[in-house]
């Protein structure tokens, strides 16, 4: 991984676009989830990206003394993430790690969090099952993301196209039944699926899940 001082121009540009388009919205989602975590919690942030969303919540991370492992497969984003964490004074709280969720060995974690990163994975159920095995006995899995209320073939076609233009991986258009199925297939119980914000066509939702035999 390049050091923050060596971030190539293309990487910095990709991160800049990401931060302008997405991070403002997902920072609000992070805040919803971090507010629920106990003091001193150990967290796995799957797909930390540029770290901009988490950095905007630096006050909560510090006040609660949270310890975060920030995982991502994108070198460009992770290089910028290190710099963002430094600027936010989070270097002692957040450790960026280059790697895929499917290969990650770590924990135990009190919380595993997917912010806009679960349903863009090639096999969400396998990812859920794997991270569930890294949770502490009373740990929880959190996910925040956009849901679409009605099927939209146009959006399903346009989303991958938007990735080519912006370089941001928006993932697939997600409907509630597919999301629920991923958890059911993983054998992980979806305890809560609440709405943070809703419009006529879509909603931003927060999911909380647990391993059935755990507390
Ligand atoms: C839409 S971004 C979300 C970034 C951040 N969590 C936020 O909410 O602002 C999704 C992130 O997931 C990462 N990602 C994709 N596949 C992954 C994998 N297999 N393991 C870990 N991260 C992955 C992408 O590189 C990207 O940074």
Image (cartoon, rainbow, N blue to C red):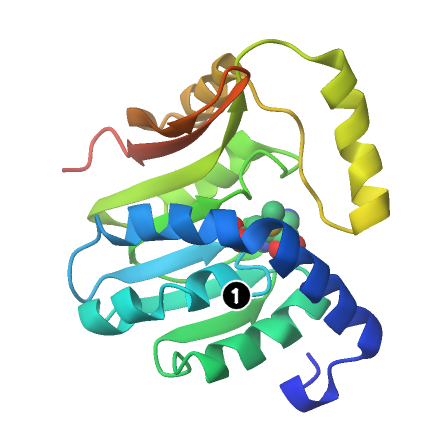
Where in the figure is residue 18, as x and y percent of width and height? 66, 56
Asked whether residue 100 appears in the rendered view, the answer is no
Q: Residue furthest front?
A: 200
What is the tally of numbered marks visible in this picture? 1
Where is mark 1, residue-wise? 51
Quadrant of res 76: bottom right
Residue 95 is at least partly visible in this image: yes
Quarter of the view holding residue 190? top left
Taking the spot 71% from the left edge, 83% from the top edge, the residue there is: 2
- Horizontally, residue 39 falls left or right of residue 174, namely left
Relative to 109, is 8 above or below?
below
- In the rendered image, the quadrant that contains the C terminus is top left
Q: Is residue 58 above or below residue 166?
A: below
Q: Quadrant of the N terminus?
A: bottom right
Q: Residue at x 44, y 54 (%)?
A: 27
Residue lying at 27% horizontally and 43% vertically, measured from the top left = 140
Decide if ligand 1 comes within 8 Å of the CB at mark 1. Answer: no
Residue 103 image position (x, y, % from top left):
57, 55
For the point 74% across and 21% down, the residue is 156
Furthest residue toward top: 150
Q: For label 1, count other residues whose C-alpha is less than 10 Å away and answer few (under 14), some (14-19) or many (20+).
A: many
Q: Secondary structure at mark 1?
A: loop
Quarter of the image holding residue 158?
A: top right
Residue 72 shown left or right of residue 182 in the figure: right
User: In this rendering, is residue 129 above or below 97?
Assistant: above
Q: In the displayed structure, would residue 35 be above or below residue 213?
A: below
For this view, does 107 lie left or right of residue 203? left
Residue 31, percent from left and from top: 33, 52
> Residue 147: horizontal and vertical position, in percent?
52, 24
Observer-nearest residue: 142 or 56? Answer: 56
């Amino acid at each position: 991984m390049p050091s923050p001082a060596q971030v190539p121009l293309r990487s910095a540009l990709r991160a800049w676009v990401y931060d302008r388009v997405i991070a403002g919205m997902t920072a609000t989602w992070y805040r919803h989830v971090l507010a629920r975590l106990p003091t001193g919690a150990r967290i796995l942030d799957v797909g930390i990206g540029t770290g901009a969303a988490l950095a905007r919540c630096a006050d909560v991370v510090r006040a609660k003394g949270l310890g975060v492992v920030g995982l991502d497969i994108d070198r460009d984003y992770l290089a910028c993430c290190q710099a963002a964490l430094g600027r936010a004074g989070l270097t002692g709280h957040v450790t960026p790690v280059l790697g895929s969720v499917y290969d990650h060995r770590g924990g135990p974690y009190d919380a595993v969090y997917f912010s806009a990163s679960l349903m863009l994975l090639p096999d969400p159920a396998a990812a859920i099952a794997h991270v569930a095995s890294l949770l502490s006995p009373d740990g929880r899995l959190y996910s925040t993301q956009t849901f679409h209320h009605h099927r939209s073939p146009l959006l399903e076609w346009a989303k991958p196209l938007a990735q080519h233009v912006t370089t941001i991986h928006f993932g697939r258009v997600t409907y509630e039944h597919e999301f629920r199925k991923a958890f059911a297939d993983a054998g992980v119980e979806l305890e809560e699926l609440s709405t943070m914000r809703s419009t006529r066509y879509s909603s931003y939702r927060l999911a909380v899940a647990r391993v059935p035999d755990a507390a």
